Amino acid sequence: MFDNLTDRLGRTLNNLRGRGRLTEENIKETMREVRMALLEADVALPVVKLFVDRVRFKALGADVLSSLTPGQMLVKIVNDELVSIMGEANEALNLAAQPPAVILMAGLQGSGKTTSAAKLARWLKESQKKSVMVVSCDIYRPAAIEQLKTLATEVQAAFFPSSPDQKPLAIAKAAISQARRQHVDVLIVDTAGRLHVDEEMMAEIKALHAALDPVETLFTVDSMTGQDAANTAKAFDEALPLTGVVLTKTDGDARGGAALSIREITGKPIKFLGVGEKTTALEPFHPERVASRILGMGDVLSLVEEVEAKVDRVQADKLASKIKKGKGFDLADFKEQLEQMNKMGGMASVMEKMPGMGGVPDHVKNQVNDKEMGKLVAIINSMTLKERTFPAVIKGARKRRIAAGSGTQVQDVNKLLKQFAQMQKMMKKMKGGGMAKMMRGMKGRMPPGMPF
């Protein structure tokens, strides 16, 4: 997310970073560029106007104009205003209620409510150590009930069954009774997609809200709709008391207008970002970290948290020890690294959070292809233990068998073996403290052996 905005703002602000003096004229010129960058990112016009006016006012202040590093001061002002417009700090879920704390999911059709309900259940279980039950009140789409049942099994949350011949209110009341009997901490109620102008459907969700008295009413909205996401959320909030927003499909949105518009337009905080299709792809929304990403400064805190939560420390330590001792790096190790990267949302997700990535040329960023990682893992899975340990034995007949077993082509197997050979060389250089020298030698290129 924010790729285009990051590039545009980065170029604009970099022109000022090194200047020893700022004038009204170059501040005016810069703010014109910032305004265009925000409009191109599909940020709502009132939000753009407010943001630009605030930054211009502070930039023309004596503290900036007389500063020894006025360009850096202006970057700080832009950063602070981005944080302010998105809500200052992360607003956590309010679960302070007699169990079960009820979370009601609302939104338009196709916005990702059902998937978000499952992602949220997983997040609550893994990071908050809560027991969770999920229930679907979407009687209009039987597939939604089955989808939630399947996802509940995947995330190991309790599932309360429902069927299309029941009334949503009856389902919800039965679910909350069952959750109480089972001493469940949180009950997540998925609802049917609806338009705020559909009076009958809005009456239904209002009745659900009144009966359940949820501690959180979360509006899920597709970030790809840009500033319309903020306008839709505002219209919903006028009919239903929302407590926050889950912004979905942010991994496919290069503009980011929704994230920058929602808080200012609705007054409601974004509480979570959906960053992919997997049930692990949900991140709490931290305005200060997102502002840092927008300005190309990375998001080290989120990256560290992901590593802590998703990387197998024992396996990582084992590999580090193996490399340090100079033992061979084999295809089983290569596969392990690909799977660890996949757990963290793929290479593109990791790169987005790394400081300085805003300055990396587009042709380098475009080399990253996370889909290739799944293909590489499938190829390695088709190999025997001997082939993984001694790749040199993989010749013509073996290559054809591996390709057939993984649903790929022989050239794909050849490509993997080439990438693995490059990775092996890199691992050898890491032995004996050669890492720093290797990084200097790459001069901004991606490390060899990465799955492009």
Image: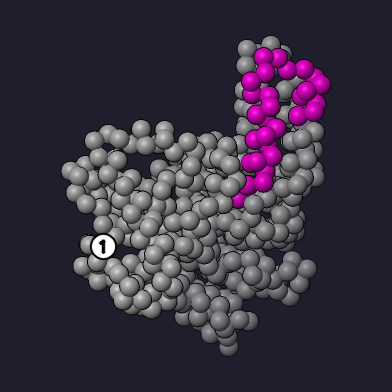
Q: Residue furthest front?
A: 396
What's the residue type where badge 1 is placed? Ala
Residue 187 visible within the image = no
Question: What secondary structure characterizes most of the magenta part?
Answer: helix
Q: Which stretch appears magenta? A: 1-30
Along the line of sight, the residue nearer the viewer: 203 or 247: 247
Q: Position of residue 316 (x, y in %)?
A: 28, 49
In the picture, residue 218 is in which quadrant?
bottom right
Task: Tell me if 161 is positioned left or right of 424 in this view.
Answer: right
Residue 328 visible within the image = yes
In the picture, residue 223 is in which quadrant?
bottom right
Along the line of sight, the residue nearer the viewer: 266 or 35: 35
In the image, residue 287 sits, relative to residue 80, either above or below, namely: below
Q: Residue at x 67, y 43 (%)?
A: 5
Q: Residue at x 55, y 69 (%)?
A: 114
Q: Position of residue 284 (x, y in %)?
A: 51, 50
- Whether the magenta-drawn stretch holds residue 5 is answered as yes
In the image, residue 138 sits, relative to residue 264, either above or below, namely: below
Residue that carries the numbered disc 1 in the rendered image = 392
Q: Residue at x 74, y 41 (%)?
A: 37
Q: Position of residue 42 (x, y in %)?
A: 74, 50
- Whether the magenta-drawn stretch holds residue 231 is answered as no
Using a 10 Å C-alpha cutoff, classify the residue at mark 1 as few (fewer than 14 neighbours), some (14 to 19) or many (20 or more): few
Q: Secondary structure at mark 1?
A: helix
Q: Residue at x 26, y 57 (%)?
A: 330
Task: Tell me if 449 is positioned left or right of 57 in this view.
Answer: left
Q: Position of residue 210 (x, y in %)?
A: 61, 66
Along the line of sight, the residue nearer the viewer: 57 or 448: 448
Task: Tell me if 394 is positioned left or right of 288 in this view.
Answer: left
